[in-house]
Image (spheres, helix red, strand yellow):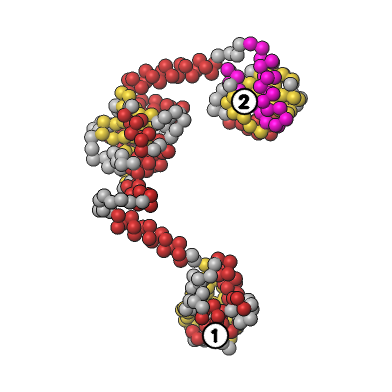
Amino acid sequence: MVHASFKAEGPLEKPDVIGAIFGQTEGLLGANLEMRELQKEGKIGRIEVDLETVDGKSVGEIHLPSALDKSETTIIAAALETIDRIGPTEASIQVTKIEDVRGSKRDYIIDRAKKLLVGLDGGDFSEMSKTLKEESRAEKIQEYGAERLPAGDLSGSEIIVVEGRADVVNLLKNRINNVIGMNGTKLPAEIARLGESKELTLFIDGDRGGKLIAQNVINNAKIVYVAMAPDGKEVEELTSKELLLALRKKMPVKEFLHWLGRSGRSERASESAPFQGDAKEALKKLYERIKDTRSALLLDSSLDVIRQVSAREVTKALLGSHKQVFALVIDGQALSSTIRACDEKSVQYCAATTFGSIDDAKVQLISL
């Protein structure tokens, strides 16, 4: 649907506008886009005109329905703007928007189908039906408390606490309704109050961030159990089977804290353990992996690769790394800014083919 507005210097009637559209575009766009022929073939519909006269001048709206493709419709729309007279008076036409009516109809179909689905039980449904069911369940999300936390049904005695809205949506899609989100990493006061009357299970992502969140929440609310997503995965991306398995493996808080203490000691020991051996030879061997690639390796204290990046991005990657970088191997020049970043991040070794000039570098420079 092409929507356009027009202004004319004198009084007009609707037939004047229709006549100008057909008359002044005739022969302009060639035989394939002749307006009269397009209307006869049903490729453009009935043109509607809303018109009023104000202080002797005419203003109004034109609505032109099109069954042409996008490019042809936009050509027709642009042609309307070439009309400079309507009836006996000077006029101008401006296209305000071109609307894809089919898109609106598709949105209506999905919304209406969701409503019709409510109350239906059983049946052999297709994948589209499954999606509709999941979306319908996700729409049951509500807002809880003054902080408007995303939540499902909190009427029961057991509540699952997750990090954010996306986690809540995923659990609702998979029929786990007794859930509330924190809307971030900070514990809201509403959830702390819920812990006084409900049995709370904290469900965290399977990464370092999840463990940090767990420590904060446990310190500030009465949490009974802790469940974790598989290593490296987030709650919002888990399948139904993964969600249920993780919740079955939930641990009492004391057991979780004991496990967390052992896990933390292990991580810290790994991060702080110095490399034993000939660093220069070891780094030269690692250099063979990236030789002639113009890339760089960020290594931990065991000389395992934390990340491989472009040699041009190594300084940025080093400063942004959440893990302790023990050594760098660069296929190219270690710029002065990179060496300074190594000192700032307490990197032990920087191996490169050439080096920028810098005085009093603390990092050990190894020429490859």
Across and down, in percent, residue 34 comes to 59, 79
The reply, left or right, for residue 42 in relation to residue 79 is left
Vertical arrangement, residue 302 with respect to residue 315, above or below? above
Quarter placement of the C terminus: top right
Q: Nearer the viewer, residue 185 or 247?
A: 247
**At 51% across and 78% down in the image, what residue appears?**
41
Q: Quadrant of residue 91?
A: bottom right
Query: How many marks do you count on the picture?
Result: 2
Report crowding for label 2: few under 14, some 14 to 19, many 20 or more residues within 10 A (C-alpha): many
Across and down, in percent, residue 94 comes to 56, 73
The reply, left or right, for residue 367 in relation to residue 48 is right
Q: Which mark is residue 348?
A: none
What segment is highlighted magenta in the picture? 277-303
Q: Earlier in the sequence, mark 2 or mark 1?
A: 1
Across and down, in percent, residue 166 comes to 40, 42
Across and down, in percent, residue 16 comes to 53, 86
Report crowding for label 1: few under 14, some 14 to 19, many 20 or more residues within 10 A (C-alpha): few
- In the structure shown, which secondary structural element does the residue marked by tag 2 occupy? strand
Q: Quadrant of residue 73?
A: bottom right
**Residue 1 is at least partly visible in this image:** yes
**At 59% across and 76% down in the image, what residue appears?**
33
Query: Residue most toward the bottom?
Result: 88
Vertical arrangement, residue 333 with respect to residue 117, above or below? above
Label 2: which residue? Answer: 298
* Amino acid type, mark 2: Leu
Query: Residue most toward the front?
Result: 124
The reply, left or right, for residue 81 in relation to residue 153 is right
Label 1: which residue? Answer: 19
- In the structure shown, which secondary structural element does the residue marked by tag 1 occupy? helix
* Amino acid type, mark 1: Gly
Q: Nearer the viewer, residue 47 or 346?
A: 47
Residue 292 forms part of the magenta stretch? yes
